[in-house]
Amino acid sequence: MPDISDARYTSNGIEQQGFVQQSDIFMDSCVVEIPDSYTLMDQLHNITPFDRLHRVFGDGYSFKYIRCSTSVTNGNVSVYKVSAPNVAIADPALTDIFLRMHQEHVFLQNYDITMDCLNISSRAIVKEFLLDNGISSKDILDDENKVGANCISWFTEEDEIRIRNKLYNKFVQLLESGEVRNQLTSKLSELVMPTSQQFGETLVACRNEGLMRLELTVHSPELKEVEWNTNLIVNTLEFLHNCRTFATSYEKQWMALVDQIHNKHTLCIYFHKEHSLGYCHWFNKTTKEISQKWLAI
């Protein structure tokens, strides 16, 4: 089965400097906690934590339980990830949502602000740039075995708030994995039928230069002001303006992947009793991820 861990997606691109903002700044997700005391009260009324979260966030948001934890301020809590439908950071609806959070005893741990950019780079190139520009090696997350060669994260602080900066090739993520926490499957379907119109428009706009996503996780118990969030991500983009990047079309990136799988074997298993077929496109020896599909026959 072909190994794509060494695919060189920048190899046929035109060298540039820095990344160019392509999308609005939006909130991608947040992590919240609900004290167990309120969860127990909800159970007495046949109300689930997801009902409480829906009252806060409304339609269009999705919720995923992460873990139980002990909070300094709220004691024993349940922690949930809330995925947002790419809400613009300047949308007044966000202010209303975070006001309802306090009323519903849902407390913020952190939130992500995101921007999509033209041009691409690699983990190795960005890491070299960071080390040459004042970022300590201890502040660069050592997670290549989880995220691969096209994603990098590093930590900074702003007004004594811890910020996780994450930069990754969004097109490659769709090809290789789809989700960081999911070691099976990919999201190739997003390239044909995007789940949101906004992302579909961004995909098209970046088709000739490539699509890199800058994502900042703000570890704050409150949503900061629009100006603060905007300045934070714009300043991060400006910090990267001398980083080596490459204008590399989706076609060229796809061909870099094809070069890794050409003349290689793929794996296919047929389950006779279940009348189903499973096949693997490729795997990544660094991240241990497998791109696979199941079909009912």
Image (tube, grey):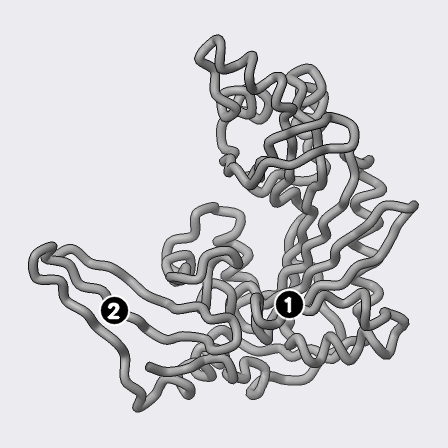
Q: Residue at x 34, y 88 (%)?
A: 262
Crowding at mark 2 (Cα within 10 Å: few <14, some 14-19, many 20+): some
Q: Is residue 281 above or below residue 237?
A: below
Q: Residue at x 57, y 78 (%)?
A: 248
> For residue 152, what is the image quadrant?
bottom right
Kindly identify which residue carries mark 1.
143
Relative to the observer, which residue lies in front, 225 or 287? 287
Task: Specify the quadrant that holds the N terminus.
Answer: bottom left
Q: CA distance from mark 1 to mark 2?
A: 28 Å
Say which amino acid is labelled 2. Answer: Tyr
Kindly identify which residue carries mark 2.
279
> For residue 260, what is the image quadrant?
bottom left
Question: Which residue is at the far top?
Answer: 45
Q: Is any part of residue 209 visible from this angle? A: no
Name the element at disc 2: strand
Q: Is residue 141 above or below residue 64?
A: below
The mark that comes first in sequence, 1 or 2, is 1
Crowding at mark 1 (Cα within 10 Å: few <14, some 14-19, many 20+): few
Q: Is residue 4 above or below residue 55?
A: below
In the image, is 261 to the left or to the right of 144? Answer: left
Q: Position of residue 18 (x, y in %)?
A: 75, 72
Relative to the observer, which residue lies in front, 4 or 26? 4
Q: Residue at x 88, y 74 (%)?
A: 133
Residue 235 is labelled as none
Nearer the viewer's eye, disc 1 or disc 2? 1
Q: Residue at x 61, y 23 (%)?
A: 36
Name the element at disc 1: loop
Q: Position of residue 226 (x, y in %)?
A: 79, 38
